[in-house]
Image: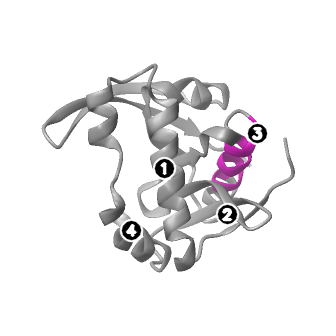
Amino acid sequence: MVNVSVRTARPGDAEAILAVKQAAIAELSASAYTRQQIEAWTPDDDALTEYRNATETDGFQILVACDDEQVVGYGVLNAESDRIEALFVHPHRARSGIGTRLLGQLESSALLIGCRALTVVSSRNATEFYELHGYTRVETRSREIDGIELEFIVLSKQLTS
């Protein structure tokens, strides 16, 4: 893995976080979803305020992976719900260990605040990543976005210290 730093996201990272998610969905999901599904799922730039607000709330722990100062991945932990809300890596940096590093830090944070298990609602193309890290399939769940049906996989993992 190329050396990256991981830190807590700041409000100024919102645009880069959104760009990572947009690129990851557009480029890494083509094998699992149709073009129409990808377009419905990909957030548009109007979501920027929502992303900025998320970095300012205590309800989520948002970590960003940076190469120098460029955000190349991010992960979101919702500790109140014992859930990983998101984990995306820019497609040009995919499969380089960045996702594994972010996931490990989110799991460690969850343990420190008392979570004993985590769930994640994964895209079909990312399910194998979570399974390789000890998550097991719980169920398949459908979600409608802009009138388009998408299938996601719910996985869970018991955390141990």
Q: Residues within 10 Å of mark 1 (few under 14, many from 20)?
A: many
Which of the labelled discs sits on residue 21, or is there none?
1
Query: The magenta stretch spans which residues?
Result: 96-107
Q: Residue furthest left?
A: 147
Point out the frontmost of discs 2 and 4. 4
Give whichever of 75, 94 is nearer the camera. Answer: 94
Q: CA distance from mark 1 to mark 2?
A: 27 Å
Q: CA distance from mark 2 to mark 4?
A: 30 Å
Q: Badge 4: how crowded within 10 Å, few (<14), some, or many (20+)? A: some
Tell me if 70 is positioned left or right of 126 in this view.
Answer: right
In the displayed structure, does residue 99 sit left or right of residue 124?
right
Whichever of labels 3 and 4 marks the residue nearer the N terminus, that label is 4
Query: Label 4, on which residue?
Result: 48
Q: What residue type is disc 3 on?
A: Gly
SS for tag 3? Answer: loop
Which secondary structure lies at badge 2? helix
Q: CA distance from mark 3 to mark 4?
A: 27 Å
Q: Position of residue 108 (x, y in %)?
A: 70, 55
The residues tagged by marks 4 and 1 sit, at their Cα atoms, a distance apart of 12 Å
Instruction: Indicate which disc, 4 or 1, sits on the residue closer to the N terminus.
Output: 1
Q: Does residue 155 show up?
A: yes
Image spot of residue 119 (x, y percent)? 47, 42
Q: Amino acid at mark 4?
A: Leu
Q: Is residue 82 left or right of residue 67?
A: left
* Residue situated in front as seen by the camera: 126 or 107: 126
Per the image, is 132 magenta? no
Residue 47 in the image, given as x and y percentages of width and height: 33, 63
Dot 4: element: helix
10 Å crowding of disc 2: few (<14), some (14-19), many (20+): few
Q: Main secondary structure of the magenta part?
A: helix
